[in-house]
Amino acid sequence: MFGFIKKSLGKTVDAIKTVAPKKKSKISKDELEDILLEADVSYEVVEKIIYYLPASDTVERKDLFRVLNSFFMECEKAKDIEAKPVVELILGVNGAGKTTTIAKLANIYKKEGKKVILGAADTFRAAAVEQLKKWANKLDIPIVATKQGHDPSAVAFDTIKSAIAKGYDNVLIDTAGRLHNQTNLSNEIKKIVRICDKACKGAPHRKILIIDGTQGNSAINQAKAFKEIVGIDAIIITKLDGTAKGGALFSIANELKLPILYIGVGEKEDDLVAFDAKEYIDGLLDSFFTNEEDGEN
């Protein structure tokens, strides 16, 4: 896992090296500020990090790790779900990678020996339905889909009812991702949530927001909007391998206080890895701190 996470931070590490080309055992707080801003950590969070570090003018790796890790420690923990089927509603704006992420999640569940069914409830875009159908065929996973423009709530209802009737373990439902400030989208998502509960009491059991990592801090306002519309239970960060804004995860954790379940590290069905805060932080710190154990320069 660590190899995947570290590899996904490649562009962020390259950006950090433009302001910190040489690794050190200790760095100044001014240097640290430059490094964090270069990695797209918001200024507010940078100030918070500096504040909680020891009063010394220089910063040691162990102290910085402790402060950075605290951002993820303060997030909610991913809740255990004992329902069958487990219904997960996938949310996010167009282009964030929802449909591909659904396929990757389905692939993970299938490899765990679970029976999975997909619901193509993004009926606003014909391309979204077709893309999900292609993934379903590739992964040999059933899908409930309809024509463009049909009621997405009906798709969600039929998917859940089919899962119950056939004994499926997991239901993944795609949703439309038009601009988050559109009233129609807000009402549509709220309706899907209500209908899910009618199909299976307590569903959706988890509402997962897909955040495009290439947008960095600018994605936070979108995330807040979705959280206000229907509430969000967890986050998946996509396209982390394609951006130099890897530090934005600290800002996302600070603002939303939600668990980050996975990060996307590529386009293939296996390119979704469980998020591990320690490995993520170490991947960043390795780019500008020497490793004291081996005297790396």
Image: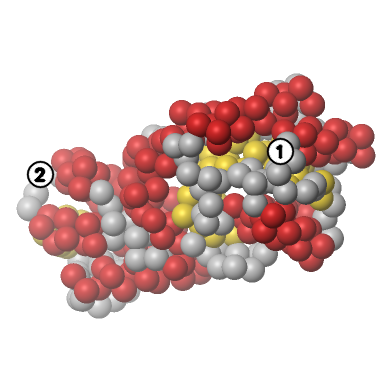
Q: Residue at x 57, y 29 (%)?
A: 187
Q: Amino acid at mark 2?
A: Ala
Which mark lies nearer to you, 2 or 1? 1
Q: Is residue 32 at least partly visible in the picture?
A: no
Residue for badge 1: 152
Looking at the image, the residue that sits furthest to the front is 149
Q: Secondary structure at mark 2?
A: loop
Above or below 253: residue 267: below
Residue nearest the viewer, comparing 53 with 140: 140
Looking at the image, the residue that sits furthest to the left is 57
Above or below 119: residue 273: below
Residue nearest the viewer, comparing 13 with 222: 222
Above or below 141: residue 224: above
In which quarter of the view is residue 196 placed?
top right
Task: Using residue 279 as the reference point, say whether residue 88 is left or right of it.
Answer: right
Q: Secondary structure at mark 1?
A: helix
User: Cβ–Cβ below 8 Å for labels 2 and 1?
Assistant: no
Q: Amino acid at mark 1?
A: Pro
Residue nearest the viewer, comparing 43 with 120: 120
Residue nearest the viewer, comparing 36 with 117: 117
Task: Using residue 35 as the reference point, say whether residue 231 is left or right of it.
Answer: right
Q: Which mark is drawn over residue 31?
A: none
Looking at the image, the residue that sits furthest to the right is 166
State how far apart marks 2 and 1 are (Cα). Answer: 55 Å
In which quarter of the view is residue 184 placed?
top right
Q: Quadrant of the C terminus?
A: bottom left
Residue for badge 2: 55
Q: Earlier in the sequence, mark 2 or mark 1?
A: 2
Q: Position of residue 197 (x, y in %)?
A: 72, 24
